[in-house]
Amino acid sequence: MEKERGNGRAAKATSKGQITIPKPVREALGLTAGDTVLFRVVDRRALVARTPSLLELAGSIPAPADVRGLPWGEVRERMRRSRADRLS
């Protein structure tokens, strides 16, 4: 059962603590079946955010120039060697 409240939406929790995210909220967040959401409690209020997939994150962090375009295995190996050098 859901009710609109001001600019938000309300939903009732079941005895198991489950809620159905109202359709307008799912649409606003771009949620589809199988998506993962993150809940954060701030001052007794819950913030809900859709977590991006790995493909959506691709390219969001710039790669150092010396590893751009290298196969992932080579990047990982260089990082391992770099860490080992710092620890020895």
Image (cartoon, helix red, strand yellow):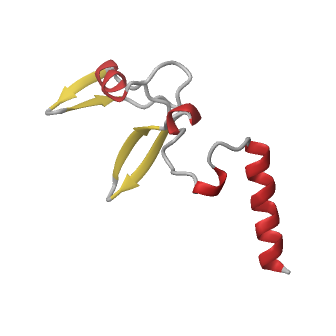
Looking at the image, which residue is at 57% across and 52% down?
63
Give above or below for 15 relative to 40: above
Q: Position of residue 50 (x, y in %)?
A: 44, 35
Q: Which sits in the foreground, 49 or 77?
A: 77
Q: In which quarter of the image is residue 7?
A: top left
**Residue found at the very far bottom of the displayed protein:** 88
Q: Where is residue 67 in the image (x, y as percent from the top left)?
A: 66, 52
Q: Position of residue 36 (x, y in %)?
A: 53, 33
Give above or below for 77 relative to 2: below
In the rendered image, which quarter contains the N terminus?
top left
Q: Which sits in the foreground, 72 or 12?
A: 72
**Residue found at the very far left of the displayed protein:** 6
Relative to 24, is 35 on the left or the right? right
Q: Which sits in the foreground, 37 or 4?
A: 37
**Residue found at the very far right of the displayed protein:** 88
Relative to 52, is 44 on the left or the right? left
Looking at the image, which residue is at 35% across and 57% down?
42
Q: Position of residue 31 (x, y in %)?
A: 43, 24
Looking at the image, which residue is at 33% across and 21% down?
27
Q: Which sits in the foreground, 46 or 76?
A: 76
Looking at the image, which residue is at 58% across and 36% down?
54
Relative to 84, is 2 on the left or the right? left
In the rendered image, which quarter contains the C terminus?
bottom right
